[in-house]
Amino acid sequence: MYATQTSLCLLLSMLTWTDAAGLKPGVRGVATRAPAEMTIDGNLAEFEHAFCTPLEYHHANLSERAAQFFYMWDDTAFYAALRTLDTKPFNGAPDNRLWEGDGVEWYFDARQDDTFRSQAWPTTANAGAVHCYWAGLKNTQISPRFCLRPGFLKAIEKVGVEVGSRRTSNGMEVEFKLPWANFPGFTAKQGAVIALDSELCYSDGAERLFRSFVFGSPLSVQQPASLAKIQLVDKLKAAHWAICGPVMFPIRVDTAWGQPTKPRVKGIIALPPKQAAEVGRILFRLTNLDGALIDEYPAEKETFANEGKFIRATASWPSDVAAPGQHHVTAVIYDLYQREQAHIAPRLVSVNWEIGY
């Protein structure tokens, strides 16, 4: 009975959240409207209220891997930004192979017909979808750069594309402007849906040795169908959290291989810099395979980098509470008024250098 009631309540909640959020079916993220004045210089001040997807907040080496992506739009362009923690920023790649160093591999589809999110990247010129790269460095020097994927050099005309970058005390900030003029079949308006994926690349001072995808996986290289649907909105609302939560607040659950106590499981949840202060209680909820509650464990917030507001929350519990393979884990996010805003499950997708979670 508990499992049936729980499932029904979750379904009704999701339907209510979807309606309140005003998001279209299948949407997984949003892009918020940009301020009236945008300067592409690497200063991310304009992105303070932008939709953010933190990633790699669970990595063992946070000071070299944690990052934040941001997404905005206006009537003239789509804007993205990246903030990284990185003590060895470097991109020694030639101008036409930017993926070989620190930077972003960017996947974007603005087609509005039945080719949207197709199984293969279009090979015709100006087809409305682009796979490209942007970076903030040349070797170790600030040098904003952009290039298209080899074999798809006519994907867009590169009209008005801009990249800006700067160093911070603990990494890099990079901005990207992609004007809608490069997508003649698309008209920017509130409620419109495009598709994208954001891939973070790190080189640790040499050639690329690490990658991480926000929405998809390395499958995005092969096909736009791997990209996430993103809706253009005016501003981010709390009602969006329920739908966009898995990329806003990604979680990781794991058991460390070396521990000072008997085995304990650790749950980690990333918090976007702007929303961290808007989050109240966070619980890691364990249920059996029938949906019955096993137990709940509160997570405590911790700031691991002040500049850029890199904040996560962690919880732990004895591994004997629930045997591996015999339970589910969900993070439940409450706002400051103790209202449930989102349920987050671990993302069971290989998103790094090699396949295998």
Image (tube, helix red, strand yellow):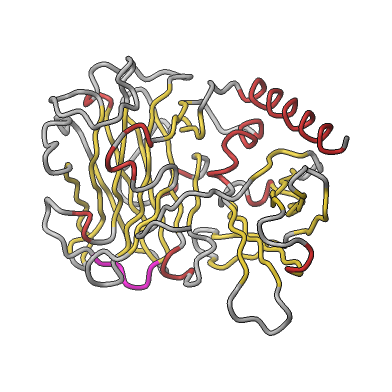
Q: Nearer the viewer, residue 202 or 90?
A: 202
The magenta stretch spans which residues? 86-90
Q: Position of residue 113 (x, y in %)?
A: 32, 14
Q: Position of residue 120 (x, y in %)?
A: 25, 31
Work out which quarter of the rendered image holds the N terminus and state it: top right
Q: Position of residue 279 (x, y in %)?
A: 70, 48
Residue at x 65%, y 81% (from the top left corner): 259
Q: In the visual, does 256 lie left or right of 65?
A: right
Q: In the visual, does 154 lie left or right of 211?
A: left
Residue at the extreme bottom of the image, as rendered = 260
User: Where, by quadrant of the figure, is residue 90 drawn?
Assistant: bottom left
Q: In the visual, does 282 lie left or right of 345?
A: right
User: Where, by quadrant of the figure, is residue 303 drawn?
Assistant: bottom right
Q: In the visual, does 179 lie left or right of 126?
A: right
Q: Position of residue 339 (x, y in %)?
A: 79, 39
Residue at x 47%, y 26% (from the top left corner): 231
Q: Nearer the viewer, residue 121 or 299?
A: 121
Q: Is residue 91 above or below residue 112?
A: below
Q: Is residue 152 above or below residue 87?
A: above
Q: Nearer the viewer, residue 88 or 46?
A: 88
